[in-house]
């Protein structure tokens, strides 16, 4: 397709060829019609001359010396005269009609009267026979009923056109001895007949011209339709080409030269998909990098403990090294589980209605034995409402479990951990309180960063617990706040999450 502002060569050639072809065919039709009318006029003139000679041979000589009290008048049968009068009215009416009516009349004609008695066009032809007298005077010997009593034209040999009361007549005058024969024909009748003959000659060419016009127009419409379709679908072709040429590592949004409104939603959806894929790949890369970084130190420590156990000189040294090895394995397993939980929390998963009250009750029940063993009794305060959420049940359970694990890890032994759930103003409010050292105000934002640990903290966490909690809470459209405990001691983590009926 030609760029905007440039003319397509194909369209230019087609238009030029069509104009030339139409010009040639139109000129041919016009020449055919003109030539047909000229030939018809010559035939009519020849008929006038022939009629005059026939009258001279058959009639003029017999009546030249006859004794006539009055001119001999040849009358026509009544049906022929009636048809002639009807035709005369049609001719007069046609003169005031539109060109299309006249064209239809030329092509198809009036329903002329034609019978065994003759034809109505006989009234369009008239003749007069004049005899020369002494002194240059002329006497009318005979005439047709359609001819006047006065001469059609001056008695001069040849063809001429003359206007009488009933119209213009084409006259041929023949001089034979002392006899003048005038044969005349109505000009309007000649015009009608010559037009019919001319159009009859040019009609096939005219029909051919109309067919060519129709086919050319159809071809132009098809070509323009193809160009418009090509122009309209060009963005789709460009989009397909850019997607096909896109490299796996290319994460830039797609852009097109021209973006129609119908294509814009598709382009936006594709760019949204590429953005989500980019985020997923980036998350996976961060997970792999973090896993390699975070597991390097524990694995190195495990290797050292294993080597120490192998080189131990007595059972006590070997058992101590094995104890350190088992503790390191437990920490590595916990770290791996937390890393997987963090990665899973950032993924888009299928959501179902989940009762936060039931999930919290189950999470507390699962961790109660461990908390009791470490000297951290769990106190649970649940509301009566089910607190329904549209969420991933595994993610919600991980969220509650990490809050309890963090409190158990940093709270001093012998202090209670309080877990409370309430429903207020269409929101679920979940809080976990402990009597630990708390978090300095200036670090309360940083603790949500993956793998961040407060310097000098006694806990042995992975630094992923609060990051996991924040990922899940934000996915649920909620908020997380780190607050001071009662009396300014300890820490209270409070989650505010919209309930299902309010979302």
Image (cartoon, helix red, strand yellow):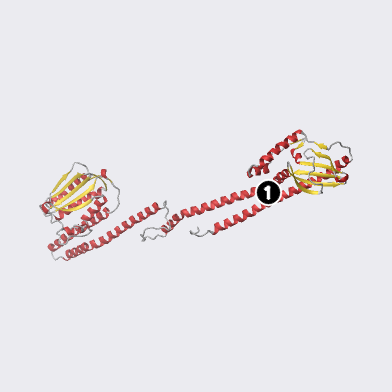
Q: Write down the quadrant of residue 274 in the picture.
A: bottom left
Q: Write down the quadrant of residue 328 in the picture.
A: bottom left
Is 306 located above or below residue 210 in the figure? below
Residue 81 visible, this orientation: yes
- Residue 16 in the image: x percent, y percent? 59, 57
In the visual, does 196 lie left or right of 70?
left
Q: Could you tell me how many numbered marks the image carries?
A: 1
Q: Residue reaching furthest front? A: 135
In the visual, does 208 lie left or right of 1?
right
Q: Quadrant of the C terminus?
A: top left
Residue at point 40%, 53% (across, down): 264
Residue at point 15%, 51% (across, down): 433
Residue at point 57%, 58% (across, down): 13
- Residue 155 in the image: x percent, y percent? 82, 47
Residue 462 visible, this orientation: no
Q: Nearer the viewer, residue 66 or 344?
A: 66
Q: Residue reaching furthest top? A: 78
Q: Nearer the viewer, residue 100 or 431?
A: 100
Element marked by disc 1: helix
- Residue 481 in the image: x percent, y percent? 19, 53
- Residue 245 in the image: x percent, y percent? 42, 60
In the visual, does 203 lie left or right of 264?
right
- Give the residue pinned by disc 1: 202
């Amino acid at each position: 397709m030609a760029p905007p502002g440039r003319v397509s060569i194909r369209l230019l050639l087609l238009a030029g060829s069509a104009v030339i072809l139409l010009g040639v065919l139109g000129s041919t039709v016009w020449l055919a019609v003109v030539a047909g009318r000229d030939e018809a006029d010559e035939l009519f003139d020849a008929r006038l001359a022939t009629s005059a000679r026939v009258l001279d041979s058959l009639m003029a000589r017999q009546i030249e010396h006859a004794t006539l009290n009055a001119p001999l008048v040849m009358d026509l049968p009544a049906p022929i005269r009636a048809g002639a009068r009807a035709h005369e009215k049609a001719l007069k009416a046609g003169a005031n009609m539109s060109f299309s009516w006249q064209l239809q009349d030329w092509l198809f004609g009036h329903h002329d009267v034609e019978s065994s008695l003759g034809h109505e066009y006989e009234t369009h032809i008239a003749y007069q026979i004049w005899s020369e007298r002494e002194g240059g005077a002329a006497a009318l010997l005979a005439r047709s009923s359609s001819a006047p009593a006065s001469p059609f034209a001056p008695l001069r040999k040849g063809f001429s056109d003359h206007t009488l009361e009933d119209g213009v007549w084409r006259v041929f005058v023949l001089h034979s001895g002392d006899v003048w024969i005038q044969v005349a024909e109505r000009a309007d009748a000649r015009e009608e007949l010559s037009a019919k003959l001319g159009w009859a000659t040019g009609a096939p060419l005219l029909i051919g011209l109309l067919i060519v016009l129709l086919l050319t127009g159809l071809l132009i419409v098809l070509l323009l339709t193809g160009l418009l379709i090509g122009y309209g679908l060009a963005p789709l072709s460009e989009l397909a080409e850019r997607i096909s040429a896109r490299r796996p590592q290319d994460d830039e949004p797609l852009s097109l030269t021209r973006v129609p409104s119908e294509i814009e939603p598709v382009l936006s959806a594709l760019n949204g998909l590429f953005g989500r894929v980019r985020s997923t790949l980036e998350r996976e890369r961060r997970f792999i990098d973090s896993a390699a970084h975070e597991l390097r130190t524990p694995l190195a420590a495990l290797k050292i403990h294993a080597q120490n156990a192998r080189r131990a000189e007595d059972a006590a040294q070997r058992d101590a090294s094995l104890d350190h090895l088992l503790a390191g394995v437990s920490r590595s397993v916990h770290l791996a589980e937390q890393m997987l939980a963090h990665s899973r929390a950032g993924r888009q998963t299928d959501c179902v209605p989940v009762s936060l009250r039931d999930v919290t009750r189950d999470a507390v029940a699962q961790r109660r034995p461990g908390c009791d063993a470490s000297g951290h009794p769990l106190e649970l305060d649940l509301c009566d409402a089910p607190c329904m959420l549209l969420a991933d049940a595994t993610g919600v359970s991980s969220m509650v479990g990490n809050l309890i694990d963090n409190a158990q890890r940093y709270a001093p032994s012998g202090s209670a951990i309080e877990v409370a759930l309430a429903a207020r103003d269409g929101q679920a409010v979940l809080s976990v309180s402990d009597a630990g050292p708390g978090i300095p105000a200036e670090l309360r934002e940083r603790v949500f960063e993956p793998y961040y640990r407060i310097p000098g903290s006694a806990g042995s966490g992975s630094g992923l617990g609060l990051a996991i909690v924040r990922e899940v809470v934000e996915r649920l459209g909620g908020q997380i706040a780190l607050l001071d405990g009662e009396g300014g001691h300890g820490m209270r983590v409070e989650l505010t999450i919209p309930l299902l009926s309010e979302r």
